[in-house]
Image (spheres, rainbow, N blue to C red):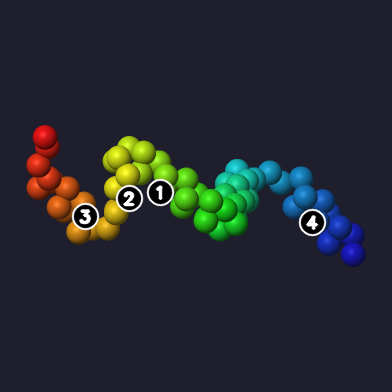
Amino acid sequence: MIFIMERLKKFWKDKRGINTVEIVVILAIVVGLALIFRDQMFGFVTNLIASVTGGETDVSSDAIRNAGNAVID
């Protein structure tokens, strides 16, 4: 029993790998927030693209390919 308690104390005080745990926790939080607010983020990005492109919000691959062929007045 004493051996187990000593091992638990040693494990609790060991700080190796703590940075990896912190990064994993932060990534989990960011992914969770992205899943929760994905509709709001999609709307924000769509409005941002619309304001930059003058109302055109088609960001499909065909629209991107055809954008290079657009005639500029």
* Place of residue 52 in the rendered image (x, y in percent of width and height, measured from the top left): 32, 37
* Place of residue 27 in the rendered image (x, y in percent of width and height, measured from the top left): 56, 50
Cα distance in 3D space between marks 2 and 1:
6 Å
Q: Identity of the amino acid at label 2?
A: Thr
Residue 57 is marked as 2
Q: Earlier in the sequence, mark 4 or mark 2?
A: 4
Cα distance in 3D space between marks 4 and 2:
60 Å
Cα distance in 3D space between marks 4 and 3:
62 Å
Residue 63 is marked as 3
Q: Earlier in the sequence, mark 4 or mark 1?
A: 4
Write down the residue under mark 1: 46
Q: Identity of the amino acid at label 4?
A: Arg
Residue 7 is marked as 4
Q: Identity of the amino acid at label 1?
A: Thr
Q: Are marks 4 and 2 in contact (CB under 8 Å)?
A: no
**Residue that appears at 56% across and 58% down:** 35
| 53 left or right of 66 in image | right
Dot 2, how many residues are within 10 Å of its Cα: few (below 14), some (14-19), or many (20+)? some
The N terminus sits in image quarter? bottom right
